[in-house]
Amino acid sequence: MNPSKRYLWIVSFITSFAAILTPLDSTIVSVSLPVISKSLNMSYVETIWVPLGYLLALTALLLPLGKLSDIKGRKPLFTNGYLIFTIGTIMSGLSLNGIELDFWRVIQGIGASFILAVGGAIITETYPANMRGRAFGIWSFAVYLGTTIGPVIGGLIVSVTTWRYIFFVTVPLSLIGYILSIIYLKEPKIRSNIKMDYVGSILLISGLLSIIYGITFGSFIGWNSFSIFISLVGLIIFGLFILYESHYKELSILDVSLLKNNIMFTAGNLAALLNYTGYFYLSFFISFYMQRILNFSPLLTSLALISLSISMVIISPISGWLSDIIGSRILATLGMILIMVGLLLFIPLGTKAGIIDISLRMILIGIGMGLFSSPNTSAVMGSVSRDKLGVASGTLNMMRFLGQSLSLAVASLIVSSFVPHNILSSIFTGLQISSFEISSELFLLGLRRLYLISSIIIGIGAILSALRNKK
C-alpha cells in the first residue's frame, strides 16, 4: 500500500488526537488531587488509587489488546476505546465517593488501553520506514502536549469551579476523536487466523495486578503477610506467563523470541521500563512538595510543572527527525543521562526553593525525555515485521505504563521508609501537619533518597540503551 500524503496527515492527526487525550485526562488530575480527596473525604489509599487505577488498567491490557489488533484489525479497537473512555470519564465526574471514583478511573484506563495499544501500530503500518521517525516525533509531541496542558487546565478549573469539570471538559474531545476515526481511518485486511491467547492474557493480567497491588498495599498500609503473599503470588503467576508464552509461540501475546533474539527490541523495551520507573513519579511528588512544603498554590504549581512538558514538546519532534538520520542509540542514551543528572540536581533543594530552581531542573529532565522517547519508539517499532506490529506496540506501551505504575509504587515505598506514615498521610491528603519543620525535613529526607535511587535506575537504563545497535 502506498498511502497518499493526505492520508498520512490524516493518520497522524487522528492518532495524535488520541495521544493528547489519554495523558491529558491523566495529568489533569495531578494538581487537583488534594481538592478531590478533601471533597469526597477519601482515605490515603483511595487517593493514591485515583492515578494508579488508571495506570494499572493500561498496563494489564495493552499486550492482550495489541495481539487482538493483529488478529481482528486496528480500527474496531481504536474506535471502541473512545466509547469506553467517554463512559469512564463522565462517570468519574459524577462519582460520590472515593471507591466510585477509583472504579471509574479503572474504566477510563481500559478505554485508554484500547486506544494506545494500537496507535503506534497504526502509525508504523501506514508510514514508510524513512518517514517513521518524524511520524513518531509528531505522536510524541501530541503526548507531551496533553501532558503539558493537563496540569494547567486542572489548576484553573479547581481555582474557579468544581473539580468535576476536570473530567467533563475532556468528553467533547473524546467524542470528536471517535467520530474522526470512524469516518477517516482505513482498515487493511485482517492479518491472520490465529486464535486469541486467552490463557496468556489471564496470566498476564492477574500476575501484573497482583504484583502492583502487593507493592502498593505494602507501601501504603504496611508490609505484612498479606502484602508479601500477594506480591509473591503475582511474581509466580508472571513467571508462569513467561513460560507459557515461550511454549505456545503461535498463540502468544508476548513474542518471547523477540526478547531473546532481537537486541534492538529488548534493549529499547528495557530502557523504556527503567526510564519511566525512574522518573515518572516526579511530577506527583513535586506537586505535593511545592504545595505542602513550599506553600505554592495549585495554579502556581501547575505553571511551574509545565516546564518539564514544554521541553518535551519542543525537543521530541526534533529528536524524531534526527533519529531518521543518525539513529536512535546516541539520542536515547543522551536523553537518559540528562534525566539522571536532573534528578541528582533535585537533591540539594530544601524548604527555601523557588519556582526558578524547580523549573530549571524540570527543563533539563524534559529535554532528556524529548531526546529519549520518539527515537526509542521508532527504533523498537522498526525492529519487528509487519505482522508483529500490534504485539510490539502493546509490549512497548506496557513497559511504559508498567514503569509508570512501578514508579508511583516504588517511590512511595522508598519515601515511606524514611517518613512516618502519619506525616505522609497529612501531606498527601491535605490534612493539617503538626510540627511543620520536623515534618518537612523528614519528607525532604525521603525525597532525597528517592532522587538518588531513581537516578541509579535511570543510569542502568542508559547503559542498556547504549548497548543497542546504531539504528
Image (spheres, rainbow, N blue to C red):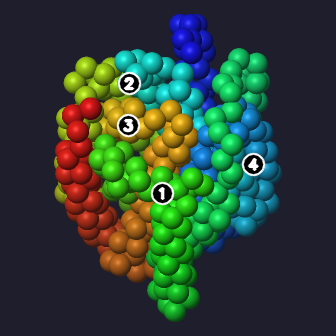
Q: Mark 4 or 3 closer to N-term?
A: 4
Q: In the rendered structure, find residue 402 and report the number of the disc placed on it.
A: 1
Q: Is residue 143 above or below residue 399?
A: above
**Circle 4: element type:** helix
Q: Are marks 4 and 3 in contact (CB under 8 Å)?
A: no
Within 10 Å of disc 1 (Cα), the crowding (few <14, some 14-19, many 20+) is many
Judge depth for marks 3 and 2 and give the one in front: 3
The amino acid pointed to by label 3 is Ser
SS under mark 3 = loop
The amino acid type found where label 2 is placed reads Gly
Position in image of residue 313 (x %, y %) = 40, 28
Q: Nearer the viewer, residue 319 or 147?
A: 319
Q: Is residue 235 visible?
A: yes
The amino acid on which the numbered mark 4 sits, given as a three-letter code, is Gly
Disc number at residue 383? 3
Single out the mark in the foreground, 1 or 4: 1
Q: Position of residue 106 (x, y in %)?
A: 68, 57
User: Relative to 452, is 38 on the left or the right?
Assistant: right
1 vs 3, front mark = 3
Disc 4 versus disc 3: nearer the observer: 3
Residue 28: percent from the left, percent from the top? 58, 43
Figure check: 449 above or below 366: below
Neighbour tally class for label 3: few under 14, some 14-19, many 20 plus, Cα within 10 Å: some
Q: Which quarter of the image is occupied by the N terminus? A: top right
Left/right placement of residue 364 relative to residue 196 reads: left
Alpha-carbon distance for marks 1 and 4? 21 Å
Q: CA distance from mark 4 to mark 3?
A: 35 Å
**Near-viewer residue (14 or 380):** 380
Secondary structure of the residue carrying numbered label 2: helix
Disc 1 to disc 3, how far (Cα)?
21 Å
Q: Sort mark 4 into few (<14), some (14-19) or many (20+) by Cα contacts within 10 Å.
A: many
The residue singled out by tag 2 in the image is 133
